[in-house]
């Protein structure tokens, strides 16, 4: 069971990383198009990645995956 959990943790981490890279590339493409629907708040303009909930979700998911991998690795008796 522990091996299954470890493998699933790695899979979740990889999905989070791929999703983060894909989202980042989409954000860069939108930035290059130069068309926006509304004005962007100045605080968001100063920190576009920290104020983006999608990026925050990926960062939190990756962090939780790493924490779970470390937790299970430390609790596994070799």
Image (tube, rainbow, N blue to C red):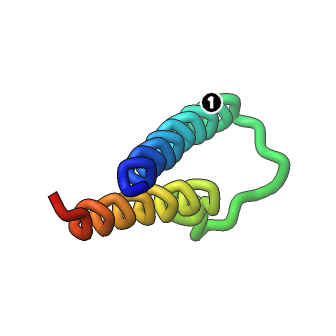
Q: Residue at x 68, y 66 (%)?
A: 41
Q: Is residue 13 visible?
A: no
Q: Residue at x 70, y 59 (%)?
A: 40
Q: Is residue 49 left or right of residue 10?
A: right
Position of the C terminus, as image quadrant, is: bottom left
Q: Nearer the viewer, residue 64 or 32?
A: 64
Left or right of 66 on screen, residue 59: right
Say which residue appears at 37% left-offset and 56% top-offset: 2
Relative to 32, residue 23 above or below? below
Q: Residues within 10 Å of mark 1 (few under 14, many from 20)?
A: few
* Left or right: residue 8 compared with residue 27: left
In the rendered image, the vertical position of residue 9 relative to residue 17, given as above or below? below
Q: Which residue is found at the position 44% from the left and 48% from the top?
A: 4
Q: Secondary structure at mark 1?
A: helix
Q: Position of 36 compared to 64: left or right?
A: right
x and y, in percent, of residue 29 in the image = 62, 30
Q: Is residue 31 visible?
A: yes
Count the marks.
1
Say above or below: 39 vs 19.
below
- Where is residue 75 drawn, in percent x and y? 25, 69
70 or 72, which is in the foreground? 72
Which residue in the protein does label 1 denote?
Answer: 29
């Amino acid at each position: 069971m522990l091996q299954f959990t470890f493998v699933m943790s790695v899979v979740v981490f990889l999905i989070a990383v791929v999703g983060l890279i894909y989202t980042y590339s989409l954000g860069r493409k939108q930035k290059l198009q130069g068309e926006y629907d509304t004005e962007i708040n100045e605080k968001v303009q100063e920190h576009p990645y920290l104020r983006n909930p999608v990026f925050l979700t990926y960062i939190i998911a990756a962090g939780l995956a790493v924490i779970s991998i470390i937790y299970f690795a430390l609790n596994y008796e070799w």
